[in-house]
Amino acid sequence: MAIDTTIFKAYDIRGIYPTQLNEELAYKIARAYAEIIRRENKDKEKIDIVVGCDMRLSTPSLKEQTIKGLTDSGLDVVDVSLVTTPTFYFSVAYYGYIGGMQVSASHNPKEYNGFKMVRAKGVPVSGEEGIYEMRDMVIADNFPSYAKKGTVSKKSGVVEDEVKAQISELKINVSKIKPFKIVVDTANAMAVLDIKAMFKDLKCDLIILNEQLDGTFPVHQPDPLAEENLKLLQNAVIENKADLGIGPDGDGDRYFFIDEKGEIVRQEILRGIMAQIALKENPGATVCYDIRPGRITKDMIEEAGGKASVTRVGH
């Protein structure tokens, strides 16, 4: 089969289904990932790999072939089913698994799908650290055969464990959180699972828009970076006289916020606020922020006594 190598990106694999990415290719990608993980874990008799996914229409068949590729390579699969990308990362690190593959195309339009891959502790497999080598293995299509196939088991309750773990780690007193009125637009995408788990024990008045998982994204794209996708949320905040609006992206690893006036809180200010909170707990620490626009982030870090360090966009 002809392979469009442009799907192998610096931080993930992503392409249009089924022209750029299909079931046959998903199987080979899983085999290539498995070879890297096996090589890096020669001392381990048992290698457990998490497989998670989003709700895109092409996901079930791609996930099936991903699992087949891993088990044909002798790896054991732990299927955590429908999860956001942060919950997927958490499941690998928290339970001590050796790695993981998430079938997802994040905020991209419905015709896309892809993979995010990690090693133990959620350490990413990125371009120079595995993805380009996987690309070359997929092109060569010369995978070894293994007499012993891997097993498949299922694990549920991961997002609930995630919320409990973070409340404990961050020493959050849930009872002190005010009963805000909050509108969330989950855009028919994965973040609704995390949102419901996070707010389950809070006294907030939560209004969720577009909460049904739907891989066709019938209302708008799950990409809050495009301001037109935040209009519905902005209007709902004003109409409901809410204190706050939250707009997650398609796989739940980016959150945008709307203030009580229905205005977008600029990302460069938001990350500055987050940095200042972190610096209260870690005085004088270095805070890394990516190169996307916003001098104010640097100013807010330094104002709080931190050291600002610019990084590339990505992991």
Image: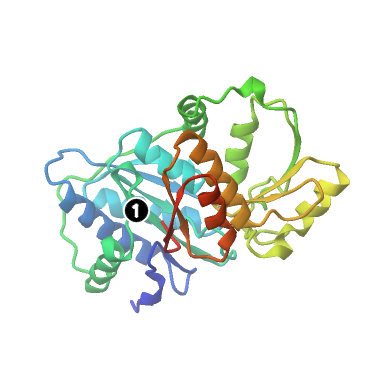
Provide the secondary structure element on which disc 1 rests.
loop
Q: Residues within 10 Å of mark 1 (few under 14, many from 20)?
A: many
Q: How is the image coloured?
A: rainbow
Q: Nearer the viewer, residue 2 or 172?
A: 172
Q: Nearer the viewer, residue 77 or 92?
A: 92
Count of numbered badges drawn on the protein: 1
Give how far across and how far down residue 247 sits, in percent.
67, 51
Is 132 displayed left or right of 256 in the figure?
left
Q: Which quadrant is the N terminus positioned in? A: bottom left
Q: Which residue is mark 1?
A: 124
Residue drawn at (44%, 46%), measured in percent from left and top? 52
Give how far across and how far down residue 186 sits, in percent.
66, 49
Say if residue 54 shows up in the picture: no
Say if residue 19 shows up in the picture: yes
Quarter location, residue 205: top right
Give how far across and how far down residue 271 sits, in percent.
56, 51
Q: Nearer the viewer, residue 187 or 177?
A: 177
Does 104 appear above or below 97?
below
Give how far across and how far down residue 47 sits, in percent.
23, 41
